[in-house]
Image: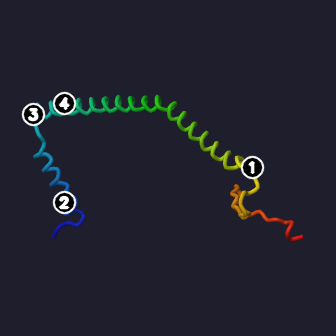
Amino acid sequence: MPNPNDPRSNAAWRAAQQWQQRARQAKPGGKVSGIKLLFTWLFFGVMMIIGTVIGLVFLLIGWAMLPFLRHRMKKRMEEMRAEQAQDIGGETYREPRSNDRARDHQVLEGDYETRDDRSNS
């Protein structure tokens, strides 16, 4: 009868032992693996340096474009302010040329109609 406290009867322990055996068998030996490892480290090191340089170049390009972007946004805001100023105070009251007195006036608060109070008194 197997001992239940024996770790070798545990399925997870046996699977771990099998993985260790496979890892020992698959381990490459010799100088070729060391050279491959060295070149791999060098390759990824060079790629990290190249990536960092490219990132810095894009950062500098972005910083160089900021004044132009700020100028463009400033012009757009000035146009928006000019449109709002024209809509609010650009039109003065004039007598309508036709008999259409129910002309719509649009202001910030909403729409309204003008009435002739002289006809009610």
Nearest-to-viewer mark from 3 and 4: 4
User: Are circles 2 and 4 on residues that touch, CB within 8 Å?
Assistant: no
The residues tagged by marks 2 and 1 sit, at their Cα atoms, a distance apart of 97 Å
Nearest-to-viewer mark from 1 and 4: 1
Position of residue 52 relative to residue 17, above or below, is: above
The residues tagged by marks 1 and 4 sit, at their Cα atoms, a distance apart of 80 Å
Nearest-to-viewer mark from 3 and 2: 3
Graded by Cα atoms within 10 Å as few (under 14), some (14 to 19) or many (20 or more), the crowding at tag 1 reads few
Identified by mark 4, the residue type is Phe
Position of residue 16 relative to residue 74, above or below, is: below
The residues tagged by marks 2 and 4 sit, at their Cα atoms, a distance apart of 41 Å
The residues tagged by marks 1 and 3 sit, at their Cα atoms, a distance apart of 93 Å
Label 4: which secondary element: helix
The residues tagged by marks 3 and 2 sit, at their Cα atoms, a distance apart of 33 Å
- In the rendered image, the quadrant that contains the N terminus is bottom left
In the visual, does 35 lie left or right of 57? left
Residue furthest to the right = 121
Q: Residue at x 47, y 31 (%)?
A: 65
Q: Which residue is mark 2?
A: 8
Label 1: which secondary element: loop
User: Are circles 1 and 3 on residues that touch, CB within 8 Å?
Assistant: no
Residue 28, by quadrant, is top left
Q: Which residue is mark 1?
A: 92
